[in-house]
Image: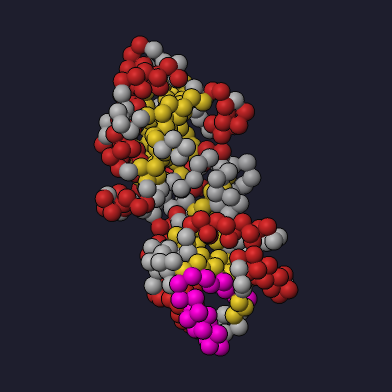
Amino acid sequence: MNIHEYQAKELLAKFGAPVPAGHAAMSVEEAVEAAKKLPGPLWVVKAQIHAGGRGKGSFKELPEGSKGGVRLAKSLDEVRAHAEDMLGNTLVTVQTGEEGKEVQRLYVTDGVDIAKEFYLAMLVDRATGRLAIVASTEGGMDIEEVAHETPEKIRTIIVDPATGLMPHHGRSVAAALGLSGALAKQAAKVTASLYKAFMGTDASQIEINPLAVTEDDELVVLDAKVGFDSNAMFRHPEIAELRDLTEEDPMEVEASKYDLAYIKLDGDIGCMVNGAGLAMATMDIIKLNGAFPANFLDVGGGADKEKVTAAFKIILSDPAVKGILVNIFGGIMRCDTIAEGIVAAAKEVDLDVPLVVRLEGTNVDKGKEILNNSGLPIIAADDLGDAAKKIVAQVKEAA
């Protein structure tokens, strides 16, 4: 689960991170009033979307070459003009794709005289199963280019969960950023505050870009991107309330209501599978046969008829889907339950795309019997390879 920058900063401030003053705004008037609450005479107006690269982004509705989603304002009139440009318009960045995201919220903050920008992040290192601190002297809007062209400028520091964050980790961060003296001490404090926030909120990512040194030699968090482990949000209801559903794919939101693991993709063959590994293998074999999956969908091992029906409807709600492949290996999940869900969903909607089903495992004969007696135009498959070939052939034939 992701949250907006203004929410992330408010959260990090509670853990002691140095965050400049700022206020969220949902309208042009609120943006102007937010600026009035700040000292000025320099403000920063930021579009709030769940995507990076806002500063270099562009708005679909504005003239080509217009300023991006992070703008400086030297007067209240400029704050108003920026807010009018951004709110309700679609911001396209390197992370949103060509479709972009509509800006519905703004964040107005104090302007800061920046002497130097750094990059600092805390992530889960899957390779080691530990928390990784990533630091670079090359912070700012070009950090992606730094990662590709000069990776040696990025330093990774691993934290052992048995000891937690130790003083030497803070010193290592300061050294990686080239800081000494009072700034080195501040870097250690910032690192400690981010670590507390990471561990205290079940975060999966805390990215500070930039972490800036001001002209007054103060370290401040100028931008923050924070994501959480969705499976842990039952422990943090106050954080779960920060979720902005308008920033998420409607089908993924619907899937989350039924505890389904669903991710929208760019292909045209819908997939319903039980088990993440089997789902990945199913998508791979679809691509091996020359087509592309429209989604990742894992119904899990404990799915019931209602959940399977919901999953099937979600797949069919995607207009890009030209065919569906159901691949179930029944262990805990029974094949007859899957079959009942498929039949129920297909009868509720107008099924006008090819459907290939491969069932194997617990109650497979009963499941096949349900499908065979359903009266639906279901194409049976003997194994995964056969299923992939059949659905790809059906979709190409229909095209």
Q: Quadrant of residue 168?
A: top left
Q: Residue at x 45, y 60 (%)?
A: 261
Q: Is residue 42 left or right of residue 353?
A: left
Please, is residue 286 above or below residue 399 in the view?
above
State the count of labels: 0
- Across and down, in percent, residue 117 comes to 47, 24
Residue 104 visible in the shown view: yes
- Across and down, in percent, residue 39 comes to 32, 31
Asked whether 177 falls inside the magenta stretch, the response is no
Please, is residue 251 above or below residue 102 in the view?
below
Asked whether 369 falls inside the magenta stretch, the response is yes
- Across and down, in percent, residue 83 comes to 45, 46
Observer-nearest of 382 and 298: 382
Q: By what rule are the colours in the image chosen?
A: secondary structure
- Across and down, in percent, residue 232 comes to 32, 50
Observer-nearest of 362 and 232: 362
Observer-nearest of 281 and 256: 281
Q: Residue at x 42, y 68 (%)?
A: 333
Residue 314 visible in the shown view: no
Observer-nearest of 87 and 153: 153
Q: Quadrant of residue 80?
A: top left
Q: Residue at x 40, y 58 (%)?
A: 245
Q: Residue at x 62, y 78 (%)?
A: 379
The residue range painted magenta reads 353-375
Image quarter of the C terminus:
bottom right
Please, is residue 250 above or below residue 93 in the view?
below
